[in-house]
Amino acid sequence: MYTFDFLIIGSGAAGLNFALNASKLGSVAIITKEEIFNTSTYYAQGGIVGVMFPPDNFEKHIKDTLEAGSYLNDRVAVEITSRESPDRIKDLIELGVRFDKKETGVYDLAREGGHSESRIFHFKDKTGYEIERVLSNKVLENPNITIFDHHFAIELITQHHIGINVEDEIDNIDCFGAYVLTPQGKVEKFLSKFTVLATGGSGNVYLTTTNPTVATGDGVAMAYRAKAQIMDMEFFQFHPTALFNPKERPAFLITEALRGYGAVLKDINGKEFMHKYDPRKSLAPRDIVARAIDNEMKLSGSEHVYLDCRHINKDELLEHFPTIYAKCLSIGIDMTKEMIPVVPAAHYQVGGVVVDYSARTKINRLYACGEVSRTGLHGANRLGSNSLLEALVFSYRAAKDAEKYFNDYSINKNIPEWNDEGVKLNEELVLITQEVKELNQTMTAYVGIVRSNLRLNRALKRIQMLYEETEELYKKSVVNRQICELRNMILVGYLITTMAISRKESIGLHYNIDHPFKTKPQ
Ligand code: FAD
Ligand code: SIN
């Protein structure tokens, strides 16, 4: 048994930033599935929004965010995020994060699809690496923070585990910590005053994703089982431009900043097409661009479209996008001379665990921040580069909130050991890999960029079958990471599909051909 004041599950921007702020109050444990840096944060390319310099202002950013979200956003969450962006960017700079500057010394702010101003702070095309590098170094040198890498959170601990029927206490559930699988295969109790879900997204429910393999929706699944509220899962963002390289998982992202820099989308015959879909052409919001690409691929029967940056100055391309240049070259594409084949890929989970403006979930003593959470910032679609900012703004707010209640709680040590009576070693690994494949195929074919009532209902039937088979296997098996992730992904697939079925309109990222499209419901 381990006891800490704060238990944080996840070591991306949200988890690390909460840890640094909470370490001023008490002891902190961070558990993380793999190495500390194996996070979506590490892979972020484009950058992070900071509304700091004229002619930009908060109102412009708020308007862009609301417009991208089809006005389904929570206006207060949008205001908070925008107005607190300067402080969170300054925190990063003070900690040592480097952002690119122009020769004149001013920050070189980039612009992405849906942004009316250049407001994206970036470090070349590897901003996430830079943020993760600095935050994780600070965490590693902090004596109040202990990192448990290669530890996997299986289940949140609530009253349910001490024999109280949570159905009777649905509005008064407490979180006491989590059951965690150690690298030695033992399940340990990690008990805490406060628990923070910072587990990131769930792109791995789909066949093609930009997300690292750790993004399997564990946080949403654990929170759902613990009876937290989950919302907006039908809004799954597909990034329009992942590198077309079918054998690679995760799919390598070609940042939107490249389009911000002048790169243009072209069809399989090398002709521009975005003017047919939106006056903003290649810089239209992501949902529009991803659907346009999907349509062009269907019209031509091609497996990808192209991104053309051959007209951009070679030295500038190499200076600003060195990682992308090197990656393309590694598979035989010189982007200064050839077009880059690109395809949409599952990228960002807009919905998640519902939280308030202090990142509190419906469960007492349980916070959720970063991609796992649903703050209301994004509405029906996320504006690029708003998510790293959201992770920092709400993890900071969560730590400030915990400070207020720090002395009100004690650690509940009266928690039973993990119950693995009657289970045996599961040697049927092939069943798990096969079920992951089936889930991926179902979600991609029926609950992807373009949906219909028929497809969604078909998906639901398949997912229900996968659910029953997996639960049966889970109950009989010694717990292991693979089966837990499968179980979590099936649950996330179920939530995406049922929420998509419930939404009787097309809006933002949710496009169902059986329902008319709304762009601006006000
Ligand atoms: P993550 O950074 O994903 O961290 C999640 C952590 O939780 C990981 O450490 C993982 O191991 C851990 N974890 C998960 N489940 C468990 C478990 N059961 N037990 C233990 N540990 C667990 N956003 C932007 O704003 N700007 C960008 O330029 C940008 N570019 C992106 C590029 C790519 C390729 C990708 C994939 C995403 C990008 N995003 C970008 C989105 C953004 O990176 C993420 O939304 C954000 O980093 C999420 O941070 P997080 O802290 O919530 O989660
Ligand atoms: C990108 O660099 O295109 C991704 C930005 C984001 O997901 O916010």
Image (cartoon, rainbow, N blue to C red):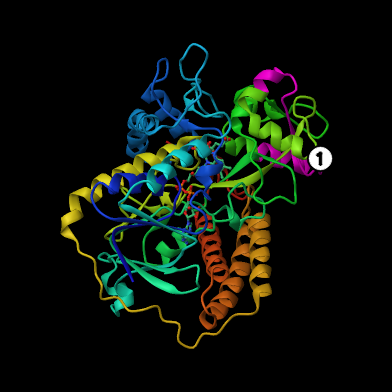
Residue 312 seen:
no
Q: Is residue 335 left or right of residue 82?
A: right
Residue 469 or residue 510, whichever sits in front? 469
Residue 115 seen:
yes
Q: Farthest top residue?
A: 104
Residue 192 or residue 53, whichever sits in front? 192
Q: Is residue 412 left or right of residue 214?
A: left
Q: Residue at x 68, y 56 (%)?
A: 445
Residue 99 or residue 70, whichever sits in front? 99
Q: Is residue 113 shown above or below 444?
A: above
Q: Quadrant of the C terminus?
A: top left
Disc 1 crowd rating (10 Å Cα; few below 14, some 14-19, many 20+) is few
Amino acid type of the residue tagged 1 in the rendering: Ser
> Residue 314: image x %, image y %?
71, 20
User: Which residues are the magenta region?
Assistant: 291-317
> Residue 343: image x %, image y %?
70, 41
